[in-house]
Image (spheres, coloured by chain):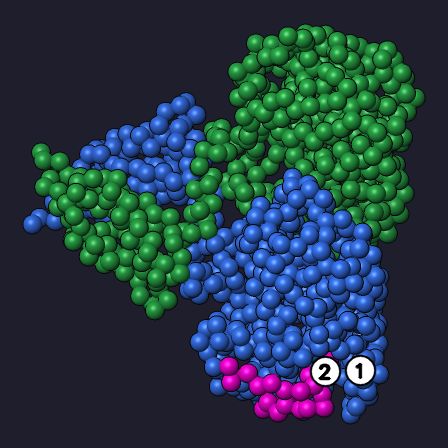
Chain colours: A blue, B green
Amino acid sequence: MAERLIYLPLGGAGEIGMNAYVYGYGRPGKERLILVDLGVTFGDMDGSPGIDLIMPDMAWLVANRDRLDGIFITHGHEDHLGALGHLWKRLDVPIYARAFTGALCRLKLQEHGLPAEAVNIVSARPEVIDAGPFKVQFVPISHSIPESGALIIDTPAGRVVHTGDFKLDGTPVVGEAFDPAMWQQIASEGQGVKVLACDSTNIFSPHPGRSEAMLANPILEWMVTQPNLVVATTFASNIARLKTLAEAAKASGRKICLLGRAMRRMVSVGLETGILSEFPETISPEEAADLPRNKVLLLVTGSQGERRAASAQLSRGRYLGLSLAEGDSFLFSSRTIPGNERSVIRIMNALSELGVDVYDADDGFFHVSGHANRPDIEAMHDLLKPRIVVPMHGEHMHLREHVQLARSKGIAAEIVTNGAMLDLTGDAPRIVDQIETGRIYLDGNVLIGAMDGIVRDRIRMALNGHALVSVIVDEEDNVLPDAWVELMGLPGRTRGGEDLAAHIEGELSEFLEGADSRVVRDDAKMEEAIRKVTRQVSMEEIGKKPEVTVIISRLMAE
Amino acid sequence: MAERLIYLPLGGAGEIGMNAYVYGYGRPGKERLILVDLGVTFGDMDGSPGIDLIMPDMAWLVANRDRLDGIFITHGHEDHLGALGHLWKRLDVPIYARAFTGALCRLKLQEHGLPAEAVNIVSARPEVIDAGPFKVQFVPISHSIPESGALIIDTPAGRVVHTGDFKLDGTPVVGEAFDPAMWQQIASEGQGVKVLACDSTNIFSPHPGRSEAMLANPILEWMVTQPNLVVATTFASNIARLKTLAEAAKASGRKICLLGRAMRRMVSVGLETGILSEFPETISPEEAADLPRNKVLLLVTGSQGERRAASAQLSRGRYLGLSLAEGDSFLFSSRTIPGNERSVIRIMNALSELGVDVYDADDGFFHVSGHANRPDIEAMHDLLKPRIVVPMHGEHMHLREHVQLARSKGIAAEIVTNGAMLDLTGDAPRIVDQIETGRIYLDGNVLIGAMDGIVRDRIRMALNGHALVSVIVDEEDNVLPDAWVELMGLPGRTRGGEDLAAHIEGELSEFLEGADSRVVRDDAKMEEAIRKVTRQVSMEEIGKKPEVTVIISRLMAE
């Protein structure tokens, strides 16, 4: 069979988060593979209570890891590298990244006691990394973190450009500017670009994106007019924003105090790797507490309302000896990711109760997006003239809109979601296989499958409460009086004011007294019968059916 | 002691939802009282899993119900009347409302087998309702439901205007237009307006609000260009919007099919009470299924992504014999309430997977808000010239912003949140008491207190999982081998691959063997010790501490 070029997203396609894209080249089923990015997404109470991190299921790739020639990390965001520490060991192949990104990758591995040497620090184009049949180059592209790299993946079937996350920013404050001339050059080499795998995040934003540099003046003008303490929050990885905020502080006579581990870590990795050539001097929380309030900027984590981050802690009162007061100012220099609204609003209200004035990015002065908007995506199409567009980094609606945009311009395009294998060899992309894929949860320090039922049971307990029934059966298969019922997350009293547990116990005892001996002798049958009675009685008494766990203890003759 | 005029919000102040505002007049502690609105808010997985409805705690008012002279319902939204069926019985005083609102109130009572006659249907101003020392008039004001009524509450201490929910809409499509001349008249009568208790919802929206009538053309222009089936969703109570959508359908040759109980109910109550003088003919789902797709508009519930509403059902496939297909159009003629974003986005993506084109209100063509924006709130201040502004219907940050706005114009104003009693007698409002207040949850069909710990336990089980331990102690205080452990919502295996329940059982058995007899004889001590061991072992093995329920069964000598 002829060799083919395939694309197989394991994460990030049909969702925003946990990016993991496989490319392959070779005979069907024998393709040599590379993986682009290995990220996480975050759990939420709605769909994954108790889960900190969600990762793509790597089962298919692990099963085929003898065919895997390398992992390429485009940039340092958690949704692109966050799973390395948890999953790299199962793949055990070289990781390639540029210096700053690579330093972050190494930290991820080291946190899990894995060898930092697995990460190969490479340079931007013209350096070429050979990985099986692929020749890969990192191409600087602008985004909301420095050193974001698009990838040129040259294959025997033609050139693939994988944008990673990008925007068209000519003045990104920190890191490399978007360089149209270079991209024109890339498009004109050899046979040109066969495939553009392209970020779709902001496909619904109709106006051209704005540059990071546009924020410097509004932020400075704002900061100098604030009468007291100023707190600003943004993603710690948005080093350009940190710099803009810090420079504004410096220019308005404020010292900068970084709060939150991620904030300090990003600045230090930025300085160590030379991404940040300079950053204004920072002070400790103790020093900040001793200065006049109008001489301080706190740069803090928690722009998404995370409960344990510095923003939330400050909103609840004191944090590391610092506290906010009437007349202080708090800036959300960030966009709220859908799903985090209530958490962010909770913090805003808590700040309001403290008398703190809150400013957010709603009017556009204090935040710009890191992703290409619709006209910018179109400009990228125009610049690279790909024969095929594969939208990625988007939910289904983003991918669909992006496909429609590409097709409207005569470019072949296909909606490809996680697990779909796309054959890119010919002129028209076509889906040739569907791989079993899914999500892995980090629960405590154990990895569990999203479909294992564990989280489903948690959600059910949260919605329905949990009733526990314990019965003891003696040596002669008599059920001892009485059944014992404990309730967790259920009303103590029925609608009529009776004790609910006692009421269920009564009904169960009655039932068990009359129970058939074939039921009493059979654990499964007895459990099922007890569960049914418990749920039925609860439904009658409180209008809901709890989850029920039954423990049957059988006494043994000594 | 002198008589005084008081204001005491029990719900709706410091939050958006479950409105319930008390006014009182008389000697301190002996004031005669009225209640304005008795609404609900909705539970969510984040803070109140398993809870359908949340209501204000009426304990204070129930304790003082001999002083309560009536309940006035301003309009028909759930957050203003939704708790009537659940709580009215505890108050048992006359309810006053205008015809359409009153019909909705009666339905609420009837659903709970309560007497519809408790609701007194009254007319708008000039009708005056005497309630103790209060003389109350309903004044038509525009909002996103017809017949929204502001209240004039005349008291011996002066005139209070309670806006209810409002916007300044001169052309509301259905219902009464905002009438500046009438409000000028109201402001000029007698001593003028002493207190304006005013909606704060949109205080952060800087531009003047837009009229409902502005939507007719964009919606019609959009509808005529849709090639296939059109589905539109909005709040069922937004009868003007339903009419606009239905008229556009009619004008574009489509028949209208209403899906969702609330949708049908609102239209029928609207027609019965004369609020709707006409509404285009509607057809059944069966009839809709038989028509060509481009001849149908489905008007459906579920604009907030509610799982069981028609929108969600349609997005998942077939519903009542109807299904969506490639080329159909789905319009969200609504704003997404913060917290509902993920649910709405989930539906949008499901529709995208079906090939349905989704349109939303983001560009402003297909939705206008029902609340007064900042300039409109200011206009209301200017029109009524109150001596005191009391912001209500807002979270803390809204109330604070509204207070700042009023004070900037020289009007006395105070932030008053639920439970704070405000004395309005003098020129400057002051908080004179803090009442114990809170939230009541409807769980199944039982009312429970938000602070009862029931929901807290559910959240803990959802985050941490639940471990159940059963031990049996014999007649001589010997613990029988072995402890039995059942896990719910916890990984079955430890990080090392061992069976977690078996491992905990082993550790518990070991602990119990060596346990002091003073511990074994004491249920509380043994329970505590078992809980501690279970949590500790779990922490070591899976990195998290579950909730633990212990059942100790003691065998009795026969």
Q: Are dots 2 and 1 on a single chain?
A: yes
Instruction: Locate residue B398, reporting x and y percent.
Output: 72, 38
Residue of label 1:
A183
Instruction: Locate residue B517, reporting x and y percent.
Output: 14, 45
Vertical placement of residue A515 versus A413, above or below:
above
Query: Where are the magenta residues, as a range?
Result: A116-141
Whether residue A233 can be seen here? no
| Number of on-image labels | 2
Instruction: Locate residue A88, reporting x and y percent.
Output: 49, 77
Instruction: Locate residue A312, reporting x and y percent.
Output: 59, 50
In-front residue for pair A424/A102: A102
Contact flag, marks 2 and 1 (Cβ < 8 Å) = yes
User: Measuring 55% from the left and 83% from the top, which residue is drawn there?
Assistant: A119
Residue of label 2:
A139
Q: What is the chain identity of the residue bearing mark 1?
A: A
User: Measuring 25% from the left and 36% from the top, which residue is drawn there?
Assistant: A483
Nearer-N-terminus badge (2/1): 2
Disc 2 residue type (three-letter):
Val
